[in-house]
Image (cartoon, helix red, strand yellow):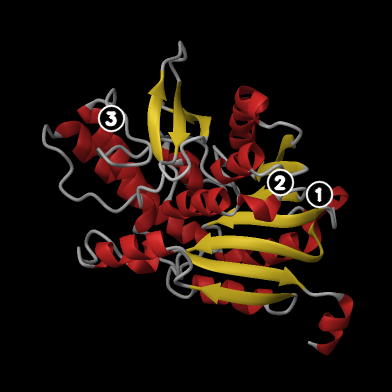
Amino acid sequence: MEKAGIDIPCSTKNDILSTKSTSAEEQKKQSSICEGRENTKCNSNAKKRWQILKQALLQRQKSAVGSGDTVSVRRFSTFELLSTKLISTNEKEHLWLQYNCSVFPEFNVDIRHLTQQVKVDDLIGFNNTGNVCVWPSEEVLSYYCLKNKHLFRNQNVCELGGGMTCLAGVIVAVCSDASHVLLTDGNENSVTNVSTIIERNKTLFGKTEVTGRELKWNEREKFDDLSGQYDHIICADCLFFDQYRQDLVDTIDCLLKPGGTASIFAPHRGTTLQAFCDLAKVKFNVDVQLNYDATLWQKHQQMLTKGKEIYDENIHYPVFITLTKMDAKELKIN
């Protein structure tokens, strides 16, 4: 969905977005920011959740600036399915990283992240979470798209709520020979950044048409022109917005062709995932999988041994949800 206005890469040694050039002070600030999202309460309404997050960020930022020690608690941020290296540029306000994957050595894309200080006031609202850093669910969705690129060949694909990078959608555009890939978020700053990423990687798209667009799930009248245009929708960790959950279901239903598929990765986050599935069952055949990739499952099992203070599967492990749009006959029976 719409996600945060500024994208700060997570900054431990093995994080997806780590770079040696990041200073210790920046690491502490970035670590605090990324941790804030994990501590929000799953079942509170969105406004209360972000007010809590704002206060936590303010306190942590003060602590990070005033201390010479590293942050004592580092929450989980990556399954290490992808790797990055810093690309030298003359841009002062942006950080370009090249994403790679050891399983697919021929793959690489350049992704731009924002480096300036996150303004906590920009985090208040349902439209701002995913731009703080690339979260585990987006990482897993990206890896899934890379491993299953054949699923998107000759298809029209849309990423919903892709945040500041739309990483998974860019990977589909580069690797799958899709007909068209639409990269969307509800935040204007995100879409502007994604447009820059598209321009940077356009020579890698081959014959695939790639576009970016602002798309807010609760403003149906603004995307009616996309109705029934897409074979496949991808989405990562966008299910916890209580007041927009039905809007997400309706948006997927609007965009998909009859028989179309949505591939969604999201952690349980309390009852939020189940709440989404209950709403989706009215319009889709719903399949939910926990163990869907051997490599990821092994990493998941290893992380469970570290304890909840480091890795909590409720908020860190992405469940794989597949929605298949029912045809008119199925809807009538249902």
Residue contact at pointers 2 and 1, CB within 8 angstroms: yes
Amino acid marked by disc 3: Glu
Which numbered dot is residue 223? 1
Which residue corresponds to the image point at 49% horizontal and 39% vertical from the top-left? Answer: 122
The answer to whether residue 46 is left or right of residue 307 is right
Chain-order first, disc 2 or disc 1: 2
Residue placed furthest toward the left: 69
The quadrant where residue 186 appears: top right
Q: How far apart are marks 2 and 3 (CA)?
A: 32 Å
Location of mark 2 (residue): 215
Mark 2 and mark 1: span between their CA atoms?
A: 7 Å
Relative image position of residue 33 (x, y in whole percent)? 34, 43
Q: Which residue is drawn at 54% across and 37% down?
A: 165
State the CA–CA distance, disc 3 to disc 1: 39 Å
Q: Which amino acid does label 2 sit on?
A: Leu
Above or below, 331 relative to 224: below
Where 231 falls versus 123 (above or below)? Answer: below
To which residue does mark 3 refer?
26
The quarter of the displayed image where residue 255 is located: bottom right
